[in-house]
Amino acid sequence: MSTTAGEAVIALTRDRGGWRDMARSYQVLIDRDNVGQEQRGQRLEFPVAPGRHEIFLKIDWCTSPVVEVDAQPGEVIELSCRAGGPARHRPSRRGLRQSPLYKPRPISLARR
């Protein structure tokens, strides 16, 4: 991928393994803007301006944790993602999962 002088790159790789979500794409959001769709085994690169950025992934009503990065000019920031958490979220006896503060995170996203 070619970038303009002074830009940074966010490189996102999705693991090939696992059966969950294997036929589905994750929406890639950088600074809350939908910048693309990532499929299983794919690597995408997104040029960004230097500075702080928030990256997260979304599928249906579920999201990954937000990863914050401070991009420097010319830097390539490597992130990886995969299906994470249980395939189904069962209500707990104490009702924690029914709390408005509980948000399932079935996508794992981390800096490499």
Image (cartoon, grey):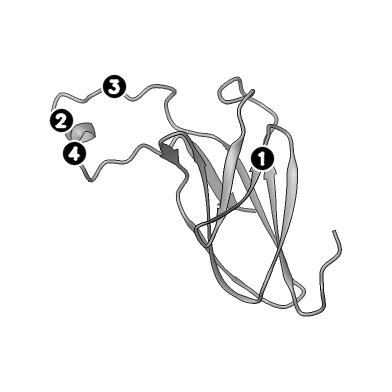
Q: Name the residue under label 4.
A: 99
Question: What residue would you read off at disc 2?
Answer: 95
Disc 3 crowd rating (10 Å Cα; few below 14, some 14-19, many 20+) is few
Q: Using the image, determine if residue 80 lies above or below residue 55.
A: above
Q: What residue type is labelled 3?
A: Arg
**Label 2 to label 3: alpha-carbon separation:** 10 Å
Q: Which of marks 1 and 2 is nearer the N terminus?
A: 1
Q: Which mark identifies residue 38?
A: 1
Give amino acid for label 4: Ser
Mark pair 1, 3: CA separation: 27 Å
Q: Residue at x 72, y 70 (%)?
A: 8
Q: How many neighbours does mark 1 have within 10 angstroms: few (below 14), some (14-19), or many (20 or more)? A: some
Q: Nearer the viewer, mark 1 or mark 3?
A: 1
Rendered image quadrant of residue 96: top left
Question: How far is disc 1 from disc 2 in space, using C-alphas?
Answer: 34 Å
For the residues marked 2 and 4, what is the alpha-carbon distance in whole angstroms?
Answer: 7 Å
Q: What element carries label 1?
A: strand
Quarter holding residue 33: bottom right
Please tell me which residue is depicted at 20% across the width and 33% down the height of the picture: 98
Q: Are marks 3 and 4 in contact (CB under 8 Å)?
A: no
Q: Which mark identifies residue 93?
A: none
Q: Which residue lies furthest to the left in this view?
A: 94
Q: Earlier in the sequence, mark 2 or mark 3?
A: 3
The percent position of residue 51, horizontal first and vertical second, equals 59, 77
What secondary structure is marked by label 2? Answer: loop
Q: Residue 90 carries which label?
A: 3
User: Secondary structure beneath disc 4?
Assistant: loop
